[in-house]
Amino acid sequence: MVASDATELQASDRELEPELEAVARETVGEPSELFESEQDSLTIRQIWDLVDRLSQWPGVESAIKAAKEAGNDSLRDVVRRALTARAQRPIDRFGFDLRYYEELFPLARWAHDHYFRVETRGVENIAEAGRVLVVANHSGTLPYDGCMVHATTRINHPQRRLLRPLVENFVYHMPYLGRFMARCGAVRACQENAQALLEADEAVLVFPEGVKGIGKLYKRRYRLQRFGRGGAVKLALKTGSPIVPCAVIGAEESMPLLSKVSWLARPLGLPYIPITPTLPLLGPLGLLPLPTKWWIEFAEPIDVSQYGPDAIRDRVLVNRLNEQLRTTIQEMIERRLDRRHSVFLG
Amino acid sequence: MGAPTLTLASRALDLDFPVPEPQKARMATKSTSSKTRSKKSSAGRRGKRSASKATASSASPERRTYRVALTGACTFLGERFIAAMENDPDCEHVLAMDIRRPSSAGTKTRYERVDLTHPAADERMAMLLERDGVDTLLHLAFLAFPSHASSWAHEVEAIGSLYVMNAAAAAKVRKVILASTMMVYGAYPNNPNYLSEDHRLRGMPSSRWVMDKIAAERELGRLKADMPEVTTTSLRFGITIGPKSHSFFSRVFSRDVVMRLMGYDPLMQFLHEDDAVGALLHAYKGDYEGAFNVVGDNVLYLSDALRLGGRVGIPVPYSLFKPTTTAFWGLQVVDIPGNFLDFFRYAWCGDDRRMREVMGFTPRFSSREALVAFYEAKERRRADLRSAQWGGS
């Protein structure tokens, strides 16, 4: 519309030109050299006309629109806006990024439902709200068991509770892995952190066996190691939180640890380098666990609030509770192992 | 063009100028007009003081007036504190000690040149504190940047703190406030996510800059042990950032392209500079014994902190980054010591419960807000520069 107007105007302009020139000659006289040169250059109207004609070419219009938008901001700002979009995600005190976690959870759900075919019992023993300390056995070379215990409570618990796993120091500070785990809700294992979580009425998942448990050889499978120095029990006593014993069966066979190399591990900051049937042989593919059948069972909660927070100084009591906890989990494992027919089929 | 040369000249003069001996030397070097002025002011002060005492005893016994002294008056905190005191009716007198005159000094402030590296600095400070009847001493004379002249920095920070505490003990000051930093805890892989005040001060043994801050804390503790009646407050400020202040960390976050450690992404806390000043004023008003972590609310991942300002992080592996940075620091090419990389590798966040519950101070800005305020100020300054350069286009 505009363009046609402009062409019309220009057409009329061109018609008028000889007349105008005649008028000019009459009033001013012959055009000087200076004015003659103006004849060749474009008038304002002609420029607008050119722009209008150009803007009708395909794609030019959208390009102009984009340029106008970018004209308000410099390129820096455009880049900055793209970058800051992710920094706006809220995280909690320990760096848990719920949206990041939700994006990744389908993967854990798939592993839970279809890869390990986890069967869960007694998940309702974890209270619907309030502080709770879930204590589980650790096995399987790589901490897939932590992921599965977490996933199973997330899937099967009536309140879809989020367990905050406490992870070993060296894992938490491993490049990329530690960052990934922290974003997914894991917290570095230490008394202060665990206490802060429990005081905020969170559900905390601990593996008191630590590296000793996850790194035990295949021939010693399902034999629970010492539960540290009773840190988990002390934590429960201090915060008055109930302990829910949890047994994981099937993780031992998913990555059978045949041998450990420790001399090469130390410079890398690892406790050991695992040798499994697949791990150094298949390269990164060896990090995948075998699709064994898993059971995860939760026992009745052990209430320690009767002892009071001062009981942590009673070392004998702490050790007794610790041992009691260990035997409870050991018995749960034995019971399930007796009923198991096949490692892969259940 | 004239102004910079002038300041340079005055600074050079400042440095060359010997620290005058307590009383006589100063009187001798000063002109008569300044002598009369100082006499007048001291007379006025005495009069005011007795008047305030009278009102305190008769009218409102709970209203207390303060006579405050501060070292490091030209630091960011010092300047802001003096500005606040100038407007505070409860404050009677400010004794500002530094090697330069603080720009925010007004009528209440009396500037005295004190060089903490001078061997007799403690004697001079004690004399000044006693002369002005100071009841609260703020020790703020700390360097904002790690210095290549580490032995000079050690003299200023560690030995200077010793002198300050000596002077405080000699002048029987009622309260001493130390501006410390969260860096005294050090960045270690086995730090809990939130460090409480009673956590061990491990610092960073390879960095004298950090260890000097710990030395200052130790001097404060020694003062408390010697004189239990003195209230000693140590404010451990987190990464203080904001539109006006400059520090090691603000310099890192001002860059558009930042080298960062590959695979490490610690949680970080930021404190707005106004909150740092607020905490200092709060600690000055009330009496709070012991150490306090002064940190902002919430935490941010380092990568998010960079992203928030549109900073581009280039990941560099630690094993490559540390030796090169150490070497370049040694050659005085870069301004970050190699061992400082740990502060970008492991978390060293502080637990703010004691600050909130015991001191009753709540920062107005969260970590994210502090950082956004900092970035926005940077962006505005950049835009101003650009418009000045291109004539507003």
Image (cartoon, coloured by chain):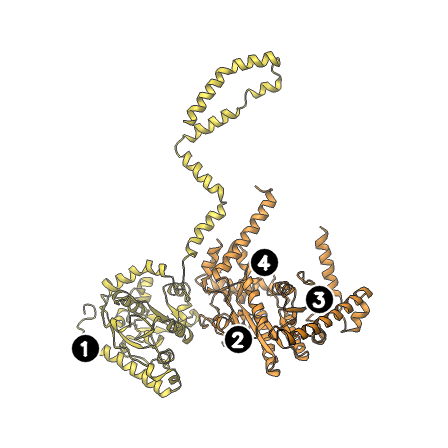
Pointer 2 or 3: first along the chain: 3
Q: What SS does tag 2 mark?
A: loop
Residue at the spot of label 2: B201
Q: Quadrant of residue B26?
A: bottom right
Mark 3: amino acid = Tyr
Question: How crowded is the residue under tag 3: few (<14 C-alpha within 10 Å), some, or many (20+)?
Answer: many
Quadrant (top left, top right, bottom left, bottom right) of the C terminus of chain A: bottom left
Query: Looking at the picture, which amino acid does disc 2 mark?
Result: Leu
Element carrying mark 1: helix
For the residues beneath circles 2 and 1, the answer to whether they share a chain is: no
Residue highlighted by disc 1: A338
Q: Are marks 4 and 3 on the same chain?
A: yes
Per the image, label 4 sits on a secondary structure element best described as loop
Does residue A13 sit above or below A108 in this rendering? above
Rounded to the nearest whole Å, what is the CA distance between mark 4 and mark 3? 23 Å
Query: Tell me, what hue is chain A?
Result: yellow
- State which chain is coloured orange: B
Horizontal side, residue B55 vs residue A76: left or right:
right
Q: Which residue is mark 4?
A: B244
Q: Are marks 4 and 1 in contact (CB under 8 Å)?
A: no
Label pair 4/3, CB-CB below 8 angstroms: no
Chain to which mark 2 belongs: B
Per the model, the C-alpha gap separating discs 4 and 1 is: 70 Å
Q: Mark 4–mark 2 contact, CB under 8 Å?
A: no
Location of mark 3 (residue): B111
Q: Quadrant of the N terminus of chain A?
A: top left
Report the side of A198 relative to A294 (left or right).
right
- Spatial separation of the CA atoms under disc 2 and disc 1: 53 Å
* Marks 2,3: beta carbons within 8 A: no
* Mark 1–mark 3 distance (CA, rounded to whole Å): 84 Å
Which class describes the residues within 10 Å of circle 4: few (<14), some (14-19), or many (20+)? few
Q: State which chain disc 4 sits on.
A: B
